[in-house]
Image (cartoon, coloured by chain):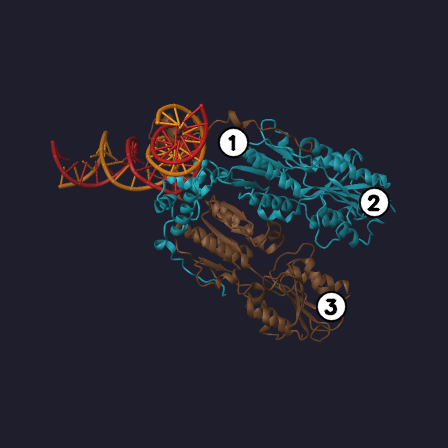
Chain colours: A brown, B cyan, C red, D orange
Amino acid sequence: MTSSDNEQSLAGPGATPRPTLAAVAAEAGVAVSTASLAFSGKGPVAEATRAAVRAAAERVGYRGPDPRAASFRTGRSRVIGVVLEGAVQSAFRDPVQLIEVDAIAERLSEVGYGMLLLPGAEDDALLGGTAMDAAILLGCSPRAVTAARSLQQLSLPLVTIDGVALAHEEDLAVVANLGVDSRAASAELARLVAAAGHSRVAMVTLPLGEDRSAGAFTGAELAAMSAATISIATERARGVGEVFSDLSGWMAADSTIADGLRAGRALLAGRADRAGRGRPTAVIAQSDLLAVGVIRAAEEAGLRVPEDLSVVGFDGVVVDGFPEGRLTTVRQPLRALGLAAAQALLAELAGEPVALPRFSAELVPGHTVAPPP
Amino acid sequence: MTSSDNEQSLAGPGATPRPTLAAVAAEAGVAVSTASLAFSGKGPVAEATRAAVRAAAERVGYRGPDPRAASFRTGRSRVIGVVLEGAVQSAFRDPVQLIEVDAIAERLSEVGYGMLLLPGAEDDALLGGTAMDAAILLGCSPRAVTAARSLQQLSLPLVTIDGVALAHEEDLAVVANLGVDSRAASAELARLVAAAGHSRVAMVTLPLGEDRSAGAFTGAELAAMSAATISIATERARGVGEVFSDLSGWMAADSTIADGLRAGRALLAGRADRAGRGRPTAVIAQSDLLAVGVIRAAEEAGLRVPEDLSVVGFDGVVVDGFPEGRLTTVRQPLRALGLAAAQALLAELAGEPVALPRFSAELVPGHTVAPPP
DNA sequence: GAAAGCTCTCGAATCGTTTCGATCGAATCG
DNA sequence: CGATTCGATCGAAACGATTCGAGAGCTTTC
């Protein structure tokens, strides 16, 4: 093929109008209502009639009910919206969201539902402008709260994953807020680090609030931010805080290896940190990607992991180019979370009670924690 | 938040029905048709009336026309489908598709269109079951051809990106087949490698056909496969073939760093390849991810790039953890391709002529090619 | 043999919006 | 001042499916 076959599609005037159920009914010599019943297999229809309708449909080239008409009549469009935190690109650079969305798509397509991907843009016009039956919100940015309100006004069933900020909005009636107990899982990891004997520990966090600018923080600064905001990052920080108080560290702008590398370089630079302590012997990162970045920084600095530096992550995802199972982390049941989110909405739409399992993170011991040198 | 607040949404019986335009019209004391005109801003409506209608809408809590009803009436649902090759996860692990989809989403959301993500599953039920106005097909798997036929039957405008296989299906009337000239770009890279003096060159290809099992191939095998199939991989192989005939190499199962690493290990194992030649001095990889994997394999084997081994890629994407601009490759205008695909469909839907720019790949010289040792 | 109970089919209403043609009043023009 | 035009508004007709209640033709039962 060459660059761009500017092939004018001349489908305009010659386009045959899509055959309707009325045409099928006429062809089969039955009423439209009967044709509908026969085709959908809902009502009591004689086998002969059913066959006749099917044959007629075949003859006139009927390919099933027009989804637009059907969704108008039934009030259901068989589409579920997934509101991302930001652009598609940034959302899907993160394996966590990627796995969740994949699981959602999988479950939805099993039952013939479509997935409408909604970049969490500033503009909520899309939310009201396209038909959907329910929505899943990923993450817990302030934007998600806005989106949730808009969607709520349209009285759409809502489910969030990791929507900690939304869970605290009293007036939002949400079907479910899914997610593991980030705080407990973080505490568990922190205890593991403490048990190995570390005391000079630094933390690499996800963005703590709206402000996405990266940089170092002291324990006091972290405490102030944690008090003011509710987010996944502050939840996890609180968990670590149960074990290590007054931790300083670095806030990353995003959950990427590159950000982790930057964080690692800053933390391992050798000079004392802003609180006056020496180089940390352990780093608690709030995501696996960040942790891998920190490990890369350690290697750059000639430090061995875990002999010279212990590192833990969070999420339990497979990081490209990093041996699976090596990193000490906790594994979130991301696929299960995605499936459950989809399932919860499908049940809600079907009018069935929504039964939600409990989700918990599982410790992955790995090989990146050892006693301090 | 704890694991799973099983918060029963009791919105069922108490749910207020969505206010309709009729309610607004009644409140404002005008006809429904006038209310529609006033609200949409289409017809000639007196300023006073418009204001009255807006005020009435505000009072009754009208939040714009029901998208289902509107799309039923107009026959447009303001949704465009994007058919992926496989699961969401595998499609979006590839930065190439990720950037394209991101660009599509961006353009669509600018004009208030939604993006329906359709995993290219075996089942085409979804394609006919949910309302969309047009579709974009990514990649050129055999599955895409099937999907294209289904969508064509629904007389939906179609655009492909890198749909070389589809471009050769005579009976498919497609608005546009977008993509750079992969063959020419590959030839350009191959000439660059040849100019550096290489003759023992191996190729790492993307899956050549339906068969996705990885493994080594000889020149003859490659020729046979190229003759039998049309795909991005065979196109690029042909381009390289213009410069180096009878190239052997390795077919990767997927465009990932891990697959590139595997390929590199196999090719650099030191023993002669199946055609009896020694270790290659240059590797032409069909994607940047594969190329980075090969470079990692070279490092593992203690080879320096480019001093001991030259490596080129394809795509021009930023690979996490690899310095931007270092890899010798060609850059595809991926964002532009995505934007153009969306734009082409929007124009087609608007009945405007579709003007497509020419897309060409741009050589990124990089620093991974040098004369053979 | 009539009443009751089936199974199958049908007609009609309905969903909420957009759009087309008609109408009505006021302003413009000759 | 009457004829014409134009802008603003309205009523009604779609769009295509689903669904409900009614009824037609059976068979079963007393």
Q: Is residue B287 above or below residue A148?
A: above
Q: Nearer the viewer, residue A40 or B21?
A: B21
Query: Dot 1: few (<14), some (14–19), or many (≥20) neighbours within 10 Å?
Result: some
Kind of element beneath mark 1:
loop
Q: Nearer the viewer, residue B77 or A114?
A: B77
Three-letter residue code for mark 2: Thr
Three-letter residue code for mark 1: Ser
Which residue corresponds to mark 3?
A: A268
Quick check: do tags 2 and 3 share a chain?
Answer: no
Query: Dot 2: few (<14), some (14–19), or many (≥20) neighbours within 10 Å?
Result: many
How far, Cα to Cα, is label 2 from label 3?
A: 38 Å
Q: Are marks 2 and 3 in contact (CB under 8 Å)?
A: no
Which residue corresponds to mark 2?
A: B281
Q: Are marks 1 and 3 in contact (CB under 8 Å)?
A: no
Kind of element beneath mark 2:
loop
Mark 3 belongs to which subunit? Answer: A
Q: Nearer the viewer, residue B270 or B18?
A: B18
How far, Cα to Cα, is label 1 from label 2?
A: 51 Å
> Could you tell me if residue A352 is visible in this image?
yes
Quick check: do tags 1 and 2 share a chain?
Answer: yes
Quadrant location of residue B282?
top right
- Residue B167 appears at what percent x and percent y? 63, 31
Three-letter residue code for mark 3: Leu
- Residue B125 appears at what percent x and percent y? 49, 39
Residue under the point 68% across and 70% down? A282
- Residue B285 appears at what percent x and percent y? 74, 43
Q: Nearer the viewer, residue B42 or B335?
A: B42
> Could you tell me if residue A187 is visible in this image?
no
Please state if B326 lies on the left or on the right of D14 as rendered.
right
Mark 2 belongs to which subunit? Answer: B
- Residue B218 appears at what percent x and percent y? 76, 38
- Name the mark on residue B155: 1
